[in-house]
Image (tube, coloured by chain):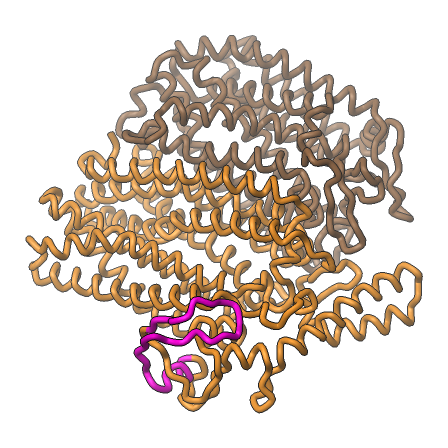
């Protein structure tokens, strides 16, 4: 990967991937969570024999189906985009990255797509119990599918279980279990799927609140809120725990992302956590500090959060770029030198192999192995390039966390009102619950913004910058496909929302179908 | 178990698996074929609804098989993935968009307030049926006719034509396989309708369509096969790895791999049997013809993939630079990854078992319009 392609191709390819990923993520959280909520409801139907639960199950299943179809449609693009737009990446890490995608197809996606057919078409064709098992398997399949995709994504954030093969100029897997059970992968999976459960719970509560606002289907709405609020509250606690753990993992494996997320330029001991902050200057990706116009801090909390030690030193952006001898932080400039040495050693090794110069090949290999961990830095020209967009990362994180805590309040209120029989005529609560639906989606998208924007310029942490990962394309075709996807996905999103709203308006009378 | 296998044995094992997935995918394209027949077979909204719902319960299988086919190719032969997808950009995106619009069309077409209208979503289904089959067939044909790319020393691929894969459409052999797959998918759809629909009005029309599509399928398939048998192929010197043109390479492959030849002929015979059986008698096993033709399709396509990849043959040849051609040996994943993935492949029989079980549960009796009541309806 010694070539660097046209920067505009990189930008447009990134834009296209971001567009398709964000559209895909508009639908995935609801699939992940609503599938389980439906499974809970159908279980109650089978256990109690109460037809009301069947009616409730079928209504939410109709909304699930509408969402599932468009989720599937937008997902296929992502898998193939690794080849179409990121072909150098596909070769450089395909030996590792391809495996989770294939496993997803074989072990998860087939379960999901096979049993979803029984879920929709099997009510009158299979037994109650077989139908219930199918509903559960659809939920499990969808979530297993997420597991493999998130394992693949986590590996990009924290590459483990591999070695570089200079003969093939690619990374090769050496330990499948290390890839699968990497702490980053496990935590990312748990944090991401539980965020989907929270989005789905907010969705169910919001839609049910609309029925209460209209004074329709009151029993249906109350029962739906009960299931969603319990599920959502449990998952909110879980999401806080996994979020806390992911902060520690990030501080360890991606300290620059962590510093950017906190707008921390100068590292410090007993670092405070900025709970709320307003940035003053409009400059990003440089060493110009973004001052706070206003901030609310918790003393020592950032050190505690990152290292479980209130006295711990949290490196800032400047430390990571310029280096800090006192804390053993190597400067980005030194890493760039190492990276350039690794790139040159790889070139020398390839040349020596061609001319059968064993001594030179061996010498180059030693040089390469010594510097390989910084290989990706060899393609950077300026140390400041390792700073991601600070402002976007900083705000995305704060809004996501604030909304996460709001959803806890929402779930608690819903449960308290429901259990104390005080949900009647709480019109302000109904409206707030409805308004919380788009907020849940916003929080979910912002979580990915922190993850993906915050790790720039890396497509694989420290090993491959985004600018070397693209296919050998001209910018024209990428612009055209970007526009095509923007138009198609927007049209489909509009269709989905309109259909969804209409189905909600129709209500659960006959399972939501006309 | 798999650790003890040599790298080439694992590469062959994975080529067999990818070939199997590809051949099952071609069989499942009957869904796409059915989508292109909807308006020819169904003259009323109700009949069209019955047709679409009959094939609609199976669209996810085709879709999932396509995704798994892509994932398996990525995991086992990543250099093909990076070369073909990054190179033949337009072809792959055309295929992908065709499948994107299919996935939503089923669920959205009959829903009220669906923004684009039922006809547009039905149009999406037709486009998917036409483009999906023709382009996938033409893309597979390039395994025999070659593509325009080079690969440098660091395994970066570079496409040499600005048309980015569309140039494949100018090749008569690629076109003939594309059209053969298109008409085959319609033939299989007809046989599937015999198996699943009990509406006489529709079945009468299906009988006619079987003829109309079987004839062009046979013409294009024979044309493709004839061209394949007589053309020079992309052979590989097993010692040096050098790629060279060998006259009658694919015919020689058939002769030198008699098992593949038998599978291919058996596949062709089964497809023909599947076509003829319902024409002779629909009541006596005619409605089971889909299984003959389906198995035949899988065997024939499977053996075509083996012809492309086995017996020292370059399966993704480059006409721009012969030595850049991909073989199963020079484009695969490492021994470790193929071993790990091989253990995962042991789940495939379980997947097939539950698919068969669910298929039988859903298609336990033929459907008519009244069966759509109280069901999830597309």
Looking at the rendered image, the quarter that the N terminus of chain B falls into is bottom right
Quarter location, residue B367: top left
Based on the picture, tell me whether residue A282 belongs to the magenta stretch.
yes
Q: Give the residues in magenta.
A: A277-305
From the viewer's perspective, is residue B258 above or below residue A280?
above
Give the colour chain A carries in the figure.
orange
- Seen at 35% across and 13% down, the residue is B44
Q: Position of residue B225 (x, y in %)?
A: 75, 22
The residue at 62%/72% (across/down) is A383
Camera sees residue B356: no
Q: From the top left corner, tell me how far across and down residue A213 is, in percent.
A: 12, 47
Which residue is at the far right? Answer: A356
In the image, taking residue A194 as reference, residue A102 lies left or right, namely right
Q: Nearer the viewer, residue A223 or A321?
A: A321
As rendered, which of B4 and B95 lies closer to the eye? Answer: B95
Give the answer, above or below, for where B152 lies relative to B362: below
């Amino acid at each position: 990967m010694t070539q660097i392609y046209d920067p505009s191709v990189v930008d447009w390819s990134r834009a296209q991937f971001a567009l398709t990923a964000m559209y895909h993520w508009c639908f995935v959280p609801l699939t992940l969570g609503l599938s389980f909520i439906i499974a809970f409801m159908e279980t109650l139907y089978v256990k109690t024999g109460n037809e009301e639960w069947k009616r409730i199950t079928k209504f939410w299943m109709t909304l699930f189906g509408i969402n599932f179809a468009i989720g599937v449609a937008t997902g296929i693009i992502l898998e193939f985009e690794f080849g179409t737009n990121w072909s150098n990446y596909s070769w450089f890490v395909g030996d590792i990255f391809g495996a989770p995608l294939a496993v997803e197809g074989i072990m998860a996606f087939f379960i999901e797509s096979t049993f979803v057919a029984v879920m929709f078409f099997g009510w009158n064709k299979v037994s109650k119990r077989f139908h219930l098992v199918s509903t559960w398997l659809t939920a499990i399949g969808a979530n297993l599918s997420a597991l493999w995709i998130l394992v693949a994504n986590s590996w990009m954030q924290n590459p483990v279980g591999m070695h570089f093969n200079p003969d093939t100029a690619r990374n090769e897997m050496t330990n499948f279990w290390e890839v699968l059970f990497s702490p980053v992968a496990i935590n990312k999976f748990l944090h991401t799927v539980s965020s989907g459960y929270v989005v789905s719970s907010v969705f169910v509560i919001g839609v049910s609140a609309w029925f209460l606002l209209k004074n329709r289907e009151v029993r249906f709405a109350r029962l739906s809120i009960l299931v969603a609020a319990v599920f959502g509250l449990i998952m909110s606690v879980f999401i806080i725990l996994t979020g806390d753990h992911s902060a520690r993992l990030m501080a360890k494996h991606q300290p620059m992302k962590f510093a950017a997320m906190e707008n921390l330029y100068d590292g410090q001991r007993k670092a405070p956590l900025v709970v709320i902050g307003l940035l003053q200057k409009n400059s990003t990706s440089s060493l110009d500090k973004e001052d706070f116009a206003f901030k609310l801090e918790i003393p020592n909390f950032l050190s505690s959060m990152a290292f479980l030690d209130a006295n711990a030193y949290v490196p800032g952006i400047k430390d990571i770029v310029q280096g800090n001898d006192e804390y053993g932080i190597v400067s980005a400039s030194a890493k760039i030198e190492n990276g350039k040495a690794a790139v040159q050693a790889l070139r020398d090794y390839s040349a020596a192999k061609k001319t059968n110069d064993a001594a030179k090949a061996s010498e180059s290999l030693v040089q390469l192995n010594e510097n390989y961990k910084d290989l990706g830095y060899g393609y950077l020209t300026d140390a400041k390039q390792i700073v991601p967009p600070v402002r976007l990362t900083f705000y995305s994180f704060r809004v996501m966390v604030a909304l996460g805590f709001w959803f806890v309040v929402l779930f608690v209120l819903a449960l308290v009102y429901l259990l104390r029989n005080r949900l009647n005529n709480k019109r302000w609560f109904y409206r707030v619950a409805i308004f919380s639906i788009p907020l849940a989606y916003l929080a979910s998208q912002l979580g990915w913004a922190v993850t993906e924007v915050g790790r720039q310029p890396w497509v694989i942490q420290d090993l491959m910058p985004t600018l070397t990962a693209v296919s050998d394309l001209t910018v024209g075709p990428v612009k055209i496909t970007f526009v095509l996807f923007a138009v198609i996905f927007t049209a489909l999103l509009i269709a989905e929302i309109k259909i969804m709203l209409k189905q909600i308006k129709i209500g659960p009378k006959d399972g939501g179908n006309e | 178990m798999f650790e003890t296998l040599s790298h080439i044995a694992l590469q062959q094992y994975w080529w067999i698996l990818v070939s199997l997935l590809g051949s099952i995918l071609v069989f499942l394209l009957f869904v796409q074929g059915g989508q292109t027949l909807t308006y020819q077979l169904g003259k009323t909204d109700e009949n069209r609804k019955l047709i679409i719902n009959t094939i609609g319960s199976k669209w996810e299988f085709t879709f999932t098989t396509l995704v798994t086919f892509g994932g398996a190719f990525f995991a086992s032969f990543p250099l093909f993935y990076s070369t073909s997808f990054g190179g033949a950009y337009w072809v792959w995106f055309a295929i992908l968009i065709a499948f994107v619009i299919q996935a939503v069309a089923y669920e959205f077409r009959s829903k009220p307030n669906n923004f684009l209208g039922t006809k547009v979503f039905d149009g999406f289904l037709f486009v998917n049926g036409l483009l999906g089959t023709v382009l996938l067939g033409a893309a597979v044909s390039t395994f025999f006719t070659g593509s325009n790319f080079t690969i440098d020393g660091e395994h970066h691929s570079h496409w040499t034509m600005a048309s980015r894969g569309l140039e494949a459409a100018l090749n008569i052999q690629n076109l003939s396989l594309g059209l053969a797959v298109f008409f085959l998918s319609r033939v299989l759809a007809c046989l599937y309708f015999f198996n699943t629909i009990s509406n006489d009005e529709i079945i009468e029309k299906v009988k006619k369509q079987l003829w109309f599509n079987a004839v062009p399928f046979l013409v294009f398939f024979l044309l493709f096969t004839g061209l394949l048998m007589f053309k020079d192929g992309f052979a590989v010197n097993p010692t040096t790895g050098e790629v060279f043109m060998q006259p009658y390479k694919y015919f020689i492959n058939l002769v030198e791999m008699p098992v593949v030849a038998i599978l291919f002929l058996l596949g062709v015979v089964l497809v023909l049997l599947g076509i003829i059986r319902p024409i002779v008698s629909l009541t006596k096993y005619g409605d089971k013809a889909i299984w003959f033709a389906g198995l035949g399709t899988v065997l024939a396509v499977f053996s075509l993939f083996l012809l492309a990849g086995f017996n020292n043959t370059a399966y993704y040849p480059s006409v721009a630079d012969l030595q850049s051609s991909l073989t199963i040996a020079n484009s695969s994943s490492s021994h470790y990854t193929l071993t790990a993935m091989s253990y995962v492949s042991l789940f495939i029989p379980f997947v097939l078992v539950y698919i068969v079980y669910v298929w039988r549960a859903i298609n336990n009796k033929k459907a008519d319009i009244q069966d759509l009541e109280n069901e999830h309806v597309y």
